Amino acid sequence: MPQVSMTVNGKRMAGEVEGRTLLVEFLRENLRLTGTHVGCDTSQCGACVVHVNGDSVKSCSILALAADGAEVTTIEGMAAADGALSQLQEAFRDYHGLQCGFCTPGMIMSAADLIKSNPNPTETEVREWLEGNICRCTGYQNIVKAILAAAARMRGEADPDFAAFAAE
Amino acid sequence: MYNFEYAKPDNLETAKSLMAREGAQALAGGQSLTPTMKQRLAQPELLVDITGLPELKGVARVDGGVRIGGGVRHVEVERSAEVQAAAPALAQLAGKIGDPQVRNRGTLGGSIANNDPSACYPAAVLALDGVVSTSNGRDIAAADFFQGLYETALEEGELVTAVTFKAPMRAAWMKFPQPASRFSLVGVFVAQFADGHRVAVTGASESGVFRHGDLEAALNTGGDLDSVAVSPSGLIADLHGTPEYRANLIRVQAKRGAAAMV
């Protein structure tokens, strides 16, 4: 069987896979990194989003072999080694950006890619960016707030005034 | 998904020899092919991953237009200064395909080689009078390239190496997305050149992307698009819309596009 190796959350990982093994299967079943979720398995929902060489991708729609040699980051790689949450995760907690939590790993990984390319997104830009991430609990309001707050904190600014949101 | 052999060549010559093998299938970004294989609707014996081919990369201004490598991802087209300068509507189109994760993987060549009847890129290739260059050394005019549902002029094993788009005076992309799939329910690309307008429509026809001559003629003569009869004949009927609904959307989106051209 083909061999695959990649750097996952900073650690060199290798394993045997089939040609058809998806990246998400390699992450969850070989490496036991089960924070990355499989929701729809039809590339609609975004629960499986991880970063490959810095870009957010749906790990259910890319082969493990296609990520050979790549730098992969999953939700397990977002917090610090001592367990301290990243600013994005902290903001999701502060703003209650999750209910059941199933979509959250994908939301976090997708949002991190947005803030990297657009450090000061508007509310509309956040909502458009989340086109590929489906949440069935929250109605997105608190997810959008959390992402806007995280982006502000990363810029060294105070949290935005969400009074306009509350009035909706 | 059925199993297959996987190869990732690092140059075009090796890719071509692999593609000559029985049961070979090219894999670009895989945003259509992977889901198709998961549903067992495709069963290649050998997947040739073409994302590592340097010959398919790069965006460059050329005389009167812009040349984009077949392996260039949607996100790269969206953010390319060359594309934004030559044809801002083309950059906007790339930035509205699917969702950010699809745009991080999907490629221009993969989209047009697949020729999904609702894909966005074919409308731009047709409206911007594109020429498709291939690994067989052919340069194929857009009008000859798209040949119906999922059908193109590509021969067995032939890859899209680049597409050269003409820079329009003005253009606009008007996508009416089907909200679940994010494909175009109807998408209209309107472009104005010195010798006239070109209006290309995707998502609507049972025969794939097409130009609408009557809408082009009306734009060329400064006529009112509301007076153009858009026939529902041959348009797609599905649970998202009737042919009549799509015919009306074509005119509405063309009118919006004509008003929004930059």
Image: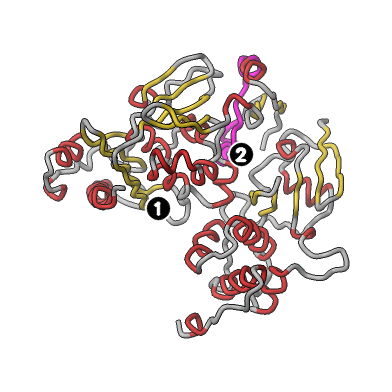
Circle 2 chain: B
Q: Would residue B69 appear left or right of A103 to someone viewing this image?
A: left
Residue type marked 2: Thr
Disc 2 is placed on an element classified as: helix
**Residue B34: image tag:** 2
Residue positioned 66% across, 60% down in the render: A112
Q: At label 1, which amino acid type do we have?
A: Pro
Residue on which disc 1 sits: B177
Q: Residues within 10 Å of mark 1 (few under 14, many from 20)?
A: some
**Residue visible at 22% across and 39% down in the picture:** B233
- Badge 1 sits on which subunit? B
Q: Residue sitting at 56 percent across and 35 percent down?
A: B41
> Quick one: SS at disc 1?
strand
Q: Position of residue B118 (x, y in %)?
A: 40, 42
The residue that appears at 64% across and 51% down in the rendered structure is A56
Kindly tell me whether residue B21 is visible in this rendering.
no
Mark 2 or mark 1, which is nearer the start of the sequence? 2
Q: Which residues are magenta?
A: B17-42
* Distance between the alpha carbons at the discs numbered 1 and 2: 22 Å
**A115 vs B11: above or below:** below
Left or right, residue A41 beside residue B62: right
Expressed as whole percent of the image width and height from the top left, the position of residue B4 reads 70, 29
Q: State yes or no: residue A59 in magenta.
A: no
Q: Which marked residue is nearer to the observer: mark 1 or mark 2?
A: 1
Q: Does B215 sit above or below residue B159?
A: below
Residue B29 in the magenta stretch? The answer is yes
